[in-house]
Amino acid sequence: MEKNIIELITPVFFVLVVVELLYSVFGDKPFYRFKDSINNLSAGIFMQIFTVFITLGLMAVYTWVYAKFGILNISNDSWIGWVFCFVLADFFYYWYHRFGHEINIFWASHVAHHQSEDYNFTVALRQGVTQNTFSLPFYLPLALMGFPPIMFLLCIQINFAYQFWLHTRAIPKLGIFEWVFNTPSQHRVHHGRDPKYIDKNYAGTFAIWDRMFGSYKEEEEEPIFGIVKPMQTWSPLWTQFHYFEELFLLSWKTKYWKDKFLVWIKPPGWKPKDLGESVVPPEIDRSTYQKFNTHIPYTLLAYSITQFFFGLGASMVYLEFKKELPLLEMIALGFYVLWTLWNIGAIFELKTSGIVSELIRLASIAALTYVYPFDFTHVEKLTAVLPVETLQYLPELMKQVALISFFVLGGFLVSQKRFFSIKGYTPKTV
């Protein structure tokens, strides 16, 4: 396949985000906060960029198991095979998802998806960069049964695409439909951090698995969204890897060798007995609860919005043309996209280090256009939609945008008078 289903329907996802956002604004619904939504989308971009390097390897493993050990020879032309593959893929997804909440090492790969304290379509795009790697073992039984790689790949992608619409507060309960299929109401429960909602409703497409295996919970009052120890940062890197670090530190600090291993396979919140009490999800006082937020000058807000859309556009180019770009240019483009998003998160926290890092990024882009012969005219898909003259002008445009951005941001930093003393926020969990 030249493109996967998720990439093909990504424009539809963004259209739905805009529709939900307009409904939120004109309906006076508090569904969206700018910095949180940017953080969600940044996590999704991180995942998509890393996926380019991970998915091929994972599919190679699945294909090898299928070729060497597949029991049946299920044809891609068998509609019964497609139905069974989809149902079984959803069944195994349920168990991966359940383990992803009940075993620490799996939770570390999945926690990024649950960190947002809001609940809207951008949350669906917030994903962990390592979760595909950790999910692979759960799907290998499909390879052993003999379901062809292309059949598995399409079924699991359709499963993921189905789950996008579950991430909204705008759709109420759907009655009898919820007895068979997963719905926004059921998935809102799954994202809740109220004690009664935690570790419930793991379903992907079919809600029947939760009812069969005792993990179903009906939505009562709307949940408080997020994780038990809320994130206090907008850093896309910290959100992806903080729980791995937490587990490593627990394993390092405990003096009991058995506990050094158990830390990784115990449920989230568990601690070795020599390191204090395990974390029990607390009840939430809704009258005093406040979501994490930071306040930045309008100049930085406007700058961040502009740079995010540049980064979003670059990420779309990366995903669309990654197979046609030379390896070095593909790696460089992915690196700069990730660097842009990290800097935006740091700017949201008023970190002088983030602003300086952004100035270095901008200066390096301008410098690269002088020393590296960027040539986009050999990318066939680009030549099909843009004149050659435009493609030849792109490096110059990159340089001009970088220099203008550099002077705008540098001017702001100088205007603060306390050049390296802007008060910032410290990334952490509470």
Image (tube, grey):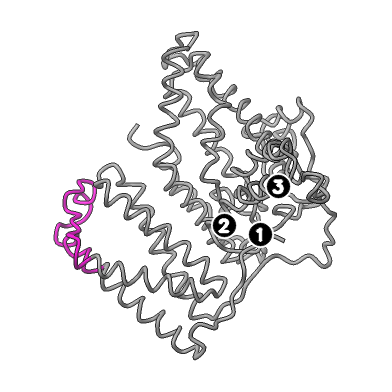
Q: Reply yes or no: does residue 389 show up in magenta.
A: yes
Q: Quadrant of residue 215?
A: top right
Left or right: where does residue 394 sit relative to residue 16? Answer: left
The total of numbered circles placed on residues is 3
Q: Reply yes or no: does residue 349 show up in magenta.
A: no
Vertical relation: 326 (above or below) 30? above
Which marked residue is nearer to the observer: mark 3 or mark 1? 1
Q: Are marks 2 and 1 in contact (CB under 8 Å)?
A: yes
User: Which residue type carries mark 2?
Assistant: Trp
Vertical relation: 155 (above or below) 406? above
Which residue is denoted by mark 3 in the rendering?
A: 188
- Estimate the spatial distance between the alpha carbons at disc 2 and disc 1, rounded to whole Å: 9 Å
Q: Earlier in the sequence, mark 3 or mark 1?
A: 3
Which marked residue is nearer to the observer: mark 3 or mark 2? 2
User: Which residue type carries mark 1?
Assistant: Met
Q: Are marks 3 and 2 in contact (CB under 8 Å)?
A: no
Q: Earlier in the sequence, mark 3 or mark 2?
A: 3
Which marked residue is nearer to the observer: mark 2 or mark 1? 2
User: Dominant secondary structure of the magenta stretch?
Assistant: helix
- Estimate the spatial distance between the alpha carbons at disc 3 and disc 2, rounded to whole Å: 24 Å
Which residue is denoted by mark 1 in the rendering?
A: 231
Quarter of the image containing the C terminus?
A: bottom right
Kind of element beneath mark 3:
helix
User: Which residue type carries mark 3?
Assistant: Arg
Quarter of the image containing the N terminus?
A: top left
What residue span does the magenta drawing correspond to? 369-397
- Picture residue at 62% right of the left edge, 69% below the top: 426
- Picture residue at 27% right of the left edge, 52% below the top: 329
Which residue is denoted by mark 2 in the rendering?
A: 238
Kind of element beneath mark 1:
loop
Q: Are marks 3 and 1 in contact (CB under 8 Å)?
A: no
Kind of element beneath mark 2:
helix
